Image (spheres, rainbow, N blue to C red):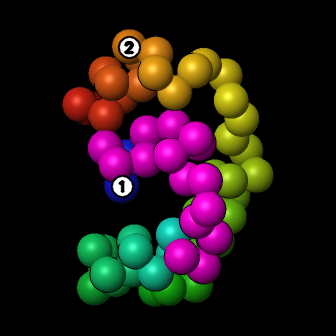
Amino acid sequence: MIRKYAHPDYLAGLTVKGMTERLYRVIGKHFTKKLIYIKVWTAALNSYLAIAANSIEISIIGML
């Protein structure tokens, strides 16, 4: 998910429910949907646009 959505601009149009469903398909066997929803919601609340989406730092984050 980080590789695909390394910057908030890449999440445009997605809802918390949509992100939860995508994550659940990948990691659902390890975590409950409720826990994933809470974590996605918390991340959304705590995120902000600190750097531009086309910054080299975003590419580096995606490669991690």
Residue 17 in the magenta stretch? The answer is yes
Which structural element holds mark 2?
A: helix
Q: Quadrant of residue 50?
A: top right
Q: Position of residue 5 (x, y in %)?
A: 43, 47
Position above or below: 48 against 45: above
Q: Position of residue 54 (x, y in %)?
A: 46, 21
Q: Nearer the viewer, mark 1 or mark 2?
A: 2
Tell me if 43 is positioned left or right of 62 in this view.
right
Q: Amino acid at mark 1?
A: Met
Q: Position of residue 41 (x, y in %)?
A: 68, 64
Q: Residue furthest right?
A: 45
Please give the label number shown on residue 1: 1
| Picture residue at 25% right of the left edge, 32% below the top | 64
Answer few, some or many: residues within 10 Å of disc 2's Cα (few below 14, many 20 plus, some between 14 and 19).
few
- Of mark 1 and mark 2, the one earlier in the sequence is 1
Tell me if 45 is positioned left or right of 23 in this view.
right
The residue labelled by disc 2 is 56
| Picture residue at 30% right of the left edge, 74% below the top | 27
Q: Position of residue 48 (x, y in %)?
A: 71, 35
In the image, 53 versus 39, the foreground residue is 53
| Picture residue at 58% right of the left edge, 65% below the top | 14
In the image, 2 versus 13, the foreground residue is 13
Q: Which residues are magenta?
A: 3-18
Q: Quadrant of residue 56?
A: top left
Position above or below: 35 against 10: below
Which structural element holds mark 1?
A: loop
Q: Amino acid at mark 2?
A: Ile
Residue 44 in view, yes or no: yes
| Picture residue at 31% right of the left edge, 34% below the top | 62
